[in-house]
Amino acid sequence: MTEYKIGKNARCAVIGYGSWATALVKVLAENEARVGWYVRNPEVLESLRTEGRNPRYLADVEFDPACIAPSDDLDAVVSAADIVILATPSAYLKEFLAPLTTPLSDKFVVSAIKGIVPGEYQTVAEYVCERYGLTYKQFGIVSGPSHAEEVSLERLSYLTVGCCDMENARLLGAKLSTKYIALSYSTDLYGIEYASILKNIYALAVGIAVGLGYGDNFLAVLISNSAMELSRFLRESYPAERDTQASAYLGDLLVTCYSVYSRNRRLGLLIGHGVSVRSALNEMTQVAEGYFAADTVRHINMRHNVPMPIAEMVYDVLYRGASARKSMKELTSKLI
């Protein structure tokens, strides 16, 4: 596998203009002289250039125009960067990257996406490396319990940087280190990425339970069983030395399950309240990654046959039209 080393003066660019992309640019701009930023929305692009604000997401964050380089020219943004950070919803990743003609083969690519590529049955790392001819040595992941809204408010948050090479992880981490961002490092690309995908499914389950009227006692059992299910899937699908009690695994699961900022919990809550899946999706103003993950993870798990009753329940409700109330009732007998 080809070695790839991040240079200390490596230039960064972010792809995407949603809340997490905006929060990441805010963090990077505290450490970098200038951050490239691919913004394909004309309204957002114009506002960033003239007012230093994203009017659609985290509008209270104000950028110094001298520190950001927003552009709707994807090739230009990528060409000028050494590190390309993907921060789009996974459902739109292929669409965002479609205009790209500049090769990524000499770049270090980072996924800050907590989702899976719909229709491909691949994680972002798997899809990007295969599609653009990258090795995993030049791919990194940024994850952890970190809602963009709290990062934008500079509330203390913990991120985990995952790279095959620990030196690369620390060099990338140095670009994300601020007074309100604490960092840890890992070489478990597979585990960190799948944990960030699975927790969205479990947050949907929690939202459904809350919408149906289940209380805190049950939610504690549901979330602890979700943690066990997540650990079981990682252990049986890709054995490795990992501590799934760490923040990149359990912490991310917990915050997504209980936070008011959680899109996936919100989607589940609507369904639990009796809103149809299609209407609930239409009501969402942001992408709930767990909807796509439920289908893709089920497909992937056909290769591994790991018992996943919670994820299976969510899939049945979302894709098979199963009754949320009846499905949750049946699930209760499978929990410990």
Image (cartoon, grey):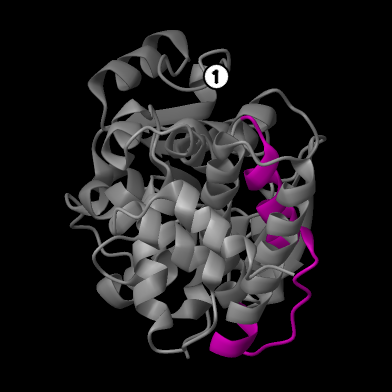
> Is 181 part of what is drawn in magenta?
no
Q: In this view, does 220 lie above or below 233?
A: above
In front: 186, or 205? 205
Q: In this view, does 169 lie above or below 71?
A: below
Q: Which amino acid does label 1 sit on?
A: Phe
Q: In which quarter of the image is residue 293?
A: bottom left
In front: 95, or 168? 95
In front: 215, or 244? 215
Residue 248 visible in rendering: yes
Q: In this view, does 195 lie above or below 130?
A: above
Residue 310: x and y in percent read: 55, 64
Q: Quadrant of residue 216?
A: top right
Q: Which residue is at 47% across, 91% downward?
A: 1
Dot 1: few (<14), some (14–19), or many (≥20) neighbours within 10 Å?
A: some
Residue 170 visible in rendering: no
Secondary structure beneath dot 1 equals: loop
Q: Which residue is at 61% across, 67% downward?
A: 192
Bounds of the magenta span?
234-260
Residue 167: x and y in percent read: 71, 72
Residue 275: x and y in percent read: 37, 32
Q: Which residue is at 29% across, 32% downward?
A: 279
Q: How many numbered tags mark residues here?
A: 1
Instruction: Work out which residue is located at the far top of the displayed protein and give it.
Output: 51
Q: In the image, is 174 to the left or to the right of 148?
A: right
In which quadrant of the rendered image does the C terminus lie?
bottom right
Residue 226: x and y in percent read: 65, 63
Q: In the image, is 119 to the left or to the right of 262?
A: left
> Is 244 part of what is drawn in magenta?
yes
Q: Mark 1 points at which residue?
A: 63
